[in-house]
Image: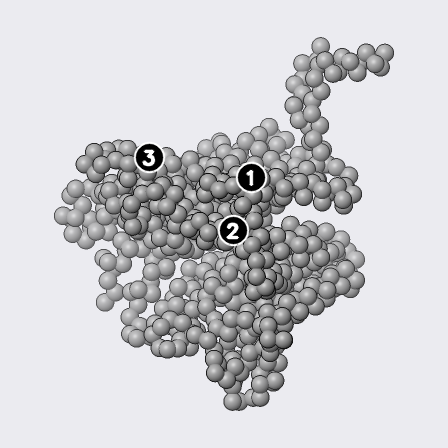
Amino acid sequence: MNKTREPLVHISRRDTLPWYKAWGIRAAAIAAALVVCAVITTLLTGENPIEVYAAMIDGNFGTSRRIWVLLQNVAMLLIVSLAVTPAFKMRFWNIGGEGQIMMGCLATAACMICLPGVVPNWLLIIIMVIASATAGGIWGLIPAFFKAKWNTNETLFTLMMNYVATQLVAFFIIIWESPKGSGHVGIINADSQIGWFPTIGGNKYMLNVLIVAVITAAMYVYLKYTKHGYEISVVGESERTARYVGIKVERVIMRTMIISGALCGITGLLLVAGTDHTITTTLSASRGFTAVMVSWLAKFSPIFMVFTSLLIEFLGRGASEIATDFGLNEAFGDILTGVILFFIIGCEFFITYRLHFRKSAAHEAKEAAENV
Amino acid sequence: MFDFIAFIPRAVTQGVPLMLGSTGETLTQKSGNLNLGLPGVMYVGAICGVIGSFIYETGTPAESINGFLAVMIPLLSCLAGSLLMGLLYCFLTVTLRANQNVTGLAMTTFGVGFGNFFGGSLIKLTDSEVPSIALSATSSYFKATLPFADKLGWFGEIFLSYGMLAYIAIVIAIISSYFLKRTRPGLNLRAVGEDPATADAAGINVTRYKYKATCIGCMIAGLGGLYYVMDYSSGIWSNDAFGDRGWLAIALVIFTMWRPAVGIVASILFGGLYILYLFIPTGTNLAVKELYKMLPYLVTIAVLIIVSLKKSRENQPPAHLGLSYFREER
């Protein structure tokens, strides 16, 4: 008799699953997560979970204003997710989206505060676009340069750059504060509305949503059908292969991070000039971090990112609606988002790997009998 | 004249949470796990201590509060909370081989949300009649110093004016340093972080080491959160007050080049940089103070760059940092 102990579970890599099966597993994980979230909510509020979800839907879609706010938030999260995606595809962990957004905000606000009266409004807006993209791009280029030249760890570098940017913004907020001593910048150009994006049909969110829709399509094409997109995926798969086929890896890394940073900068532009018309250190609202998860959950596909960012924003908004209804803290949304993320992160395992359970002795005996 | 006697104790109290956080994260990273969930873990550690202590303190009349229980209850609930976070991280990244960056960021979202939620809703959830969470009794036990400390002038002020967790933090850092450098399990742990395939071939149980290092690391980091709320802020919880200290602790790990003993001095230095703006005479120019707050991050970036330039073999991050290990994919 063989004495080797056979483990209960044996794991092996699967062949690629057909997409509908993979997404079936993900949908099942989300469903399971929603059940767990409902249980948590019920335990904390003592309410019927169905009513809780009704409150969440009402919080998101209850009035046309709420729908627009949801669309705006989805658009903002989506554009940051799109921004970090090309970097992720080449395995460059850009978690500095936050700082790149802040630099975009800063550049936009600087133009809006310093340039009125110097240049006409239409030229100002063009300058704002260029300035914000450049500021974000430079903030992305710095870690990329060191990564490309000396292989400096980009995860930690970009992370640190976030706080440098935040403090820079804090510095300028005090310089620009109005009224003096308040610690806020207030609404910039509140009377003249110089540098504000035009509103389409009286809706201040419409233009932002349209811009992001265009960028989504452009990013899809860029990643899938252009030479740049191809180079990014080769570098991501294997740097050695990329070098062998003659791709200049350093250049691809730096170029891609400029694009990534510039798009984050544009997000800052949309936030400052499009909707908020002011600058605070929390304007980007951790989107740089959330975007990492959104992009990864969508498997770096711009189309699926629309759904994942909708899911995250829906949960966040819905949970804060529950929190207001029951007098709980706003941070409830983060807990629910966290739980759902854990489930989705965990379920990837079952898409990539396959479990073989040890067959019981009786089962083996039966099989042996059949084979005889 | 720069007031060192006032400055150093404040730098130390700022530095202790960072010291505990970075010691925990160093152990974790030595096993090859880049735990970006550290800020979340520290929040969870802090709030679990607060919850335990809050229930004990509001449920017990003031005169019958037992000093031993008042310390042990928050301490154990803090350790339990951060242990659970560590287990969650390991389950997802080691057992299920999920991406470490994404898991870590999700844990930070969850942990910070968890802390703020219970911090903001604890009073309502427990139906108590206090206006805010102020655990002064528990805090007084955590902050207790040696009885003769304040009689020793500047010496007592600089070396003996801290609560017990500060000294525990230093002891933990020294033990971790000894463990990593001088013991066989420490050597095995470093092997796991550098090259899990080789470690596996040498008969080291990679999964077990990763689990143990990460869970113990998370528990140490959780203590940092507990120190912050019980000692530094005198038992008063306010949402988001902990701020970005968790990220700063991760920065410290790089700054110290994965050496917990260096972390003792480095965290006090970082603590000093963090509050330096309070001691710099800038007159009415408040804006410059914001630039001073940038210093810890700039210093970390500089270290990161210098290390990658020098490429000396001792000062590199663990080679397998951030990657999952799957035996059959070698």
Residue with the mark numbered 2: A319
2 vs 3, front mark? 2
Which residue type does callout 2 highlight?
Answer: Ala
Q: Are marks 1 and 3 in contact (CB under 8 Å)?
A: no
Query: Which mark is drawn over residue B133?
Result: none
State the residue lying farthest toward the top: A1
Quarter-of-image position of residue A262: bottom right
| Residue in view at x 80 percent, y 13 percent | A368
State the residue lying farthest toward the right: A372
Which residue type does callout 3 highlight?
Answer: Ile
The crowding category of the residue bearing disc 2, from other C-alpha atoms within 10 Å (few below 14, some 14 to 19, many at least 20), is many
- Label 2, label 3: how far apart the Cα atoms are: 31 Å
Q: Chain of mark 1?
A: A
| x and y, in percent, of residue A20 in the image | 76, 44
Query: Which mark is drawn over residue B73?
Result: 3
| x and y, in percent, of residue B111 in the image | 47, 46
Circle nearer the N terminus (1, 2): 1
Q: Is residue B221 above or below residue A6?
A: below
Residue with the mark numbered 1: A36
A18, B58: nearer the viewer: B58
1 vs 3, front mark? 1
Q: Secondary structure at mark 2?
A: helix
Quadrant (top left, top right, bottom left, bottom right) of the C terminus of chain A: top right
The crowding category of the residue bearing disc 1, from other C-alpha atoms within 10 Å (few below 14, some 14 to 19, many at least 20), is some
Q: Secondary structure at mark 3?
A: helix
Q: Secondary structure at mark 1?
A: helix
| Residue in view at x 69 percent, y 40 percent | A25
Which residue type does callout 1 highlight?
Answer: Val
Q: Chain of mark 2?
A: A
Q: Are marks 1 and 2 in contact (CB under 8 Å)?
A: no
Residue A164 shown left or right of residue B173 in the figure:
right
| Residue in view at x 35 percent, y 55 percent | B271
